[in-house]
Image (tube, rainbow, N blue to C red):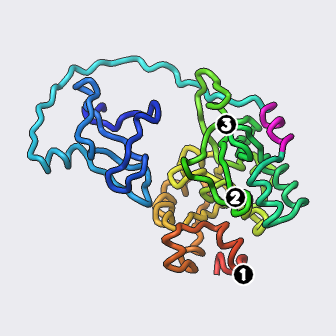
C-alpha cells in the first residue's frame, strides 16, 4: 500500500533538517508524492532521536490542527512484477587485515592506557578485529563480520583517546567503509558486531548491548558471555536475530532503552531464549539516567560485584 504523504527518503545530508523540538540536525520532513514531492509545513516530520526527543508531527495532525481539507486522487492499481531480491554485498577481507597493521588508534590507546594494559588490549584487537582508519586521524573501524566470516561492512568512529568518549563536535564522527571505499552498487545488509565469535564460543550465552565499545569492554569484565553489539537502540531486530536461533541471550540496554528492548522480547523470543538485565534500571541514579549511561560506564566506574549484581 502506498501513501500520498510519506517521510522523505534519505539521499544526502540535504534531506536531513533541523528538528523544531530539539534543534538537532536529525529531522526528516514529510513530502506530498502527488505534488512533485513538495514538502508540507516545516514542522511536519519526525526526529530520529527516538529516546532524547521523540518529536513526530504527522500530516494527519497538521491537517486537523489547521482545519485543512484535502482531496485525494485515487489512481488505478498497477500490478508490477517485482525483481528478484538483490544479493547482499561484502567487503574484501584484505581491507580488514590492512586495518589491523596500524594501531595509531584513539580507542585502542584508551583501552591500553586507561583500562587493560597492552596484553589484554592486544587480545581484544585480535578477537574483535578492531581496525584503524585514516578517514580521521586516530579513528576506529568496527568490522561487521558474519558467522561465515563474510565482511558486511565496517563502521568508522572517532574517540577521545583519554576519556574513551565519542567525538561529536563540531560534528558526529561516523562513517562507513563501503562509503569511504566508494564501492559502486553496494547493497548493505548489516549484522551484529562480534557475530563472528558465536561459533567459536558455542557453549556460552550471548549478551547484546547497543555500542561496539560497550561490547568490547564488557567482554573483559564478564567473559562468561559472547558479547555482541547492535550499533544503536533501533538495530535490535528480528531479521538480525535469526542467526541466534536456539541460543540463550541476555539483553543489556542502555539507560532510556530498557522499556523499548523489553517490548521487543515477545517477537524475538520465537528465535532464541531471551531475558533482559535490570542492573542499570535498579542501580542508576537520576543523574546517571539523564546521562544515558550504558553498561561500560558501570563496569569502569563502579566498584561493585557485577557478576552477583546482574542477576540478583
Q: Position of residue 258 (x, y in %)?
A: 51, 66
Q: Residue drawn at (55%, 49%), measured in percent from left and top?
A: 170
Q: Eyeballing the image, is 211 above or below 28? A: below
Give the labeled residue for mark 3. 153
10 Å neighbourhood of mark 2: few (<14), some, or many (≥20)? many
Q: Eyeballing the image, is 301 above or below 208? A: below
> Mark 2 near mark 3, Cβ–Cβ under 8 Å?
no
Q: Eyeballing the image, is 252 above or below 144? A: below
Q: Residue drawn at (68%, 28%), measured in percent from left and top?
A: 181
Residue 217 — which label?
none
Q: Residue drawn at (77%, 69%), measured in percent from left and top?
A: 221
Secondary structure category for the residue under label 2: helix
10 Å neighbourhood of mark 3: few (<14), some, or many (≥20)? many
Give the labeled residue for mark 1. 303
Horizontal side of residue 84 vs 155, given as left or right: left
Q: Earlier in the sequence, mark 2 or mark 1?
A: 2
Give the labeled residue for mark 2. 215
Horizontal side of residue 74 vs 38, given as left or right: left
Q: Quadrant of the C terminus?
A: bottom right
* Camera-side residue of 246 and 32: 32
In magenta stretch: residue 97: yes
Q: Position of residue 225 (x, y in %)?
A: 74, 63
Q: Which residues are magenta?
A: 94-102
Secondary structure category for the residue under label 3: strand
Mark 1 vs mark 3, foreground winner is 1
In magenta stretch: residue 237: no
For residue 132, what is the image quadrant?
top right
Q: Position of residue 289 (x, y in %)?
A: 51, 72
* Camera-side residue of 229 and 115: 115
Amino acid at each position: 500500500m502506498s501513501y500520498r504523504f510519506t517521510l522523505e527518503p534519505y539521499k544526502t545530508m540535504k534531506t536531513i533538517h533541523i528538528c523544531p523540538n530539539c534543534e538537532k540536525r536529525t529531522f526528516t520532513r514529510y513530502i506530498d508524492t502527488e505534488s512533485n514531492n513538495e514538502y508540507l509545513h516545516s514542522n511536519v516530520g519526525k526526529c530520529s532521536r527516538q529516546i532524547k526527543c521523540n518529536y513526530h508531527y504527522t500530516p494527519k495532525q497538521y491537517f486537523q490542527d489547521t482545519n485543512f481539507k484535502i482531496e485525494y486522487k485515487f489512481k488505478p492499481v498497477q500490478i508490477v512484477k517485482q525483481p528478484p531480491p538483490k544479493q547482499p554485498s561484502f567487503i574484501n577481507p584484505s581491507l580488514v587485515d590492512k586495518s589491523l597493521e596500524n594501531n595509531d588508534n584513539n580507542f585502542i590507546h584508551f583501552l591500553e592506557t586507561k583500562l587493560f594494559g597492552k596484553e589484554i588490549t592486544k587480545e581484544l584487537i585480535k578477537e574483535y578485529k578492531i581496525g584503524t582508519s585514516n578517514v580521521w586521524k586516530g579513528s576506529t573501524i568496527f568490522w561487521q563480520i558474519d558467522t561465515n566470516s563474510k565482511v558486511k561492512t565496517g563502521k568508522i568512529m572517532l574517540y577521545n583517546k583519554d576519556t574513551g568518549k565519542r567525538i561529536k563536535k563540531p560534528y558526529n564522527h561516523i562513517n562507513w567503509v563501503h562509503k569511504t571505499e566508494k564501492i559502486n552498487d553496494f547493497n548493505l545488509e548489516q549484522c551484529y558486531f562480534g557475530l563472528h565469535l558465536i561459533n567459536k564460543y558455542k557453549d556460552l550465552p550471548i549478551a547484546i548491548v547497543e555500542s561496539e565499545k560497550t561490547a568490547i569492554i564488557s567482554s573483559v569484565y564478564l567473559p562468561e558471555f559472547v558479547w555482541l553489539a547492535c550499533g544503536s537502540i533501533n538495530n535490535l531486530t528480528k531479521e538480525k536475530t535469526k542467526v541466534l536461533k536456539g541460543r540463550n541471550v541476555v539483553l543489556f540496554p542502555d539507560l532510556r532503552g530498557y522499556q523499548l528492548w523489553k517490548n521487543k522480547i515477545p517477537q524475538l523470543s520465537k528465535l532464541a531464549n531471551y531475558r533482559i538485565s535490570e542492573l542499570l534500571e535498579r542501580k542508576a541514579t537520576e543523574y546517571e539516567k539523564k546521562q544515558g549511561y550504558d553498561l561500560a560506564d558501570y563496569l569502569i566506574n563502579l566498584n561493585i560485584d557485577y557478576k552477583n549484581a546482574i542477576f540478583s
